[in-house]
Amino acid sequence: MRKQDRREAAQRQNVMVAVIVVL
């Protein structure tokens, strides 16, 4: 497993949460 993959997934989740909060 790559660390970058995990980091990207976490970043994507963060973005989704931010979008939901904004909405």
Image (spheres, rainbow, N blue to C red):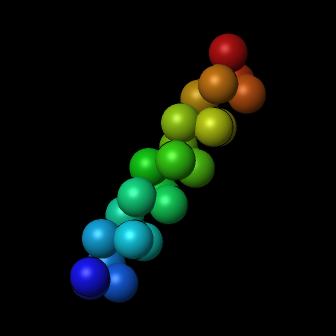
Numbered label tally:
0
Seen from the viewer's position, the closer of residues 17 and 22 is: 17
Q: Residue furthest right?
A: 21
Q: Is residue 6 above or below residue 17?
A: below
Q: Does residue 17 appear to the left or right of 2 in the view shown?
A: right
Q: Is residue 16 above or below residue 14?
A: above
In which quarter of the view is residue 3 placed?
A: bottom left
Seen from the viewer's position, the closer of residues 10 and 22 is: 10
The image quadrant where one finds the N terminus is bottom left
Instruction: Give the x, y percent position of residue 23.
Output: 67, 15
Q: Does residue 19 appear to the left or right of 1 in the view shown?
A: right
Residue at left 73%, top 28%? 21
Residue at left 64%, top 37%? 18
Q: Is residue 16 above or below residue 3?
A: above
Instruction: Give the x, y percent position of residue 11.
Output: 48, 58
Q: Residue furthest top?
A: 23
